[in-house]
Image (cartoon, rainbow, N blue to C red):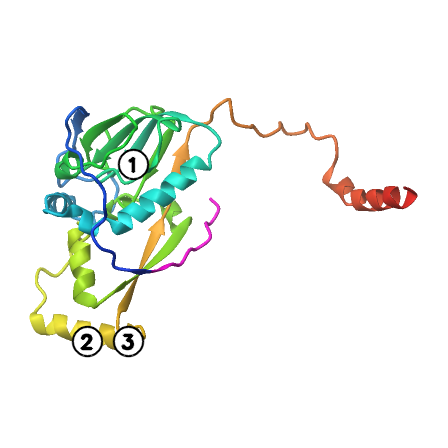
Amino acid sequence: MLRQARLWRPWRRPPAARVLAANLGGKEVASGVFPLGNTSPGALNIFDRNLKRKQKNWAAQQPEPMKFDYLREEVGNRIADRIYDISRDFTLALDVGCGRGYIAQHLNKETVGKFFQTDIAENALKNSLESEIPTVSVLADEEFLPFRENTFDLVVSSLSLHWVNDLPRALEQDTDEIQVNYPGMFELMEDLQGMGESNCSWNRKALLHRETMLAAAAVYGEMYRNEDGSVPATYQIYYMIGWKYHDSQARPAERGSATVSFGELGKLNNLMSQTEKSQ
């Protein structure tokens, strides 16, 4: 995979996002959640998936979930831009770990015909954002998707796969960096909790003492404080979009069909120079 150029943008912690929330009224809903606590055979069992489900459900149930949506909104918009760059439309698409539908809201029905949105948290699906695309909400674990192979023309995922135990090493490429400036470390932690992004590793510490937190905040502020007193946090975003080949897209020429060898390409400059001089 090609490595995407790294983007850097200094951000302020923004106010609550002005987006409309919608319930599941009028939407198709299905369920495909694998028994919680299980993981795919042979995969490292690093994260407590049951705890992650509780964290995301808690975050989606807060009175103002939009307050913490700024990062997911930005990444969803960037993924949508990448989809628009693909010169074709998609009849059936899948968003793995959709949250409240941060990608679908930026797409139109001319690009995607129908969008399946899966998430482990039922509260996120109930509070999904509005989209002009017909959507199907599926309660499912990212590690155990209830779909047959070769079902979708497009598969996307946004800020979900980093909590999956069975993750390919290929995700070490295609990355963005987004820097957000916070008043302090505690505001950063508040936002992570509000996003449903608190730590769920099995080896996490159950409790941090107040003195430890205060000391960490002081060290963090001393080492990384900006000139205006804010402290930065850098989010590394990993992108992966997969789509199925379509006849409308150009296909590579068959091997051996070229009429000019690479060895002869170097002679073209000389030939063109001679032609220009003769004219």
Sequence-first tag of 3 and 1: 1
Is disc 3 surrounded by few (<14), some (14 to 19) or many (20+) residues within 10 Å? few
Q: Which of the 4 image quarters holds residue 107?
A: top left
What residue lies at 18% left-to-right and 29% top-to-bottom? 32
Q: Mark 1 belongs to which amino acid?
A: Gln
Q: Which residues are magenta?
A: 1-10
**Residue located beneath label 1 in the image:** 105
Provide residue 51's location: percent of width, then percent of height: 12, 47
**Disc 1: CA contacts within 10 A as few (<14), some (14-19) or many (>=20):** some
* Residue placed under numbered mark 2 in the picture: 218
Q: Find residue 168 and report its image quarter.
A: top left
At label 2, which amino acid type do we have?
Ala
Position in image of residue 87 (x %, y %): 49, 31
Disc 3/disc 1 C-alpha distance (Å):
39 Å
Tag of residue 223: 3
Q: Is residue 1 visible?
A: yes
**Rendered-image quadrant of the C terminus:** top right
State which tag comes first along the sequence, 2 or 1: 1
User: Is the residue 260 above or below the residue 198 in the image?
Assistant: above
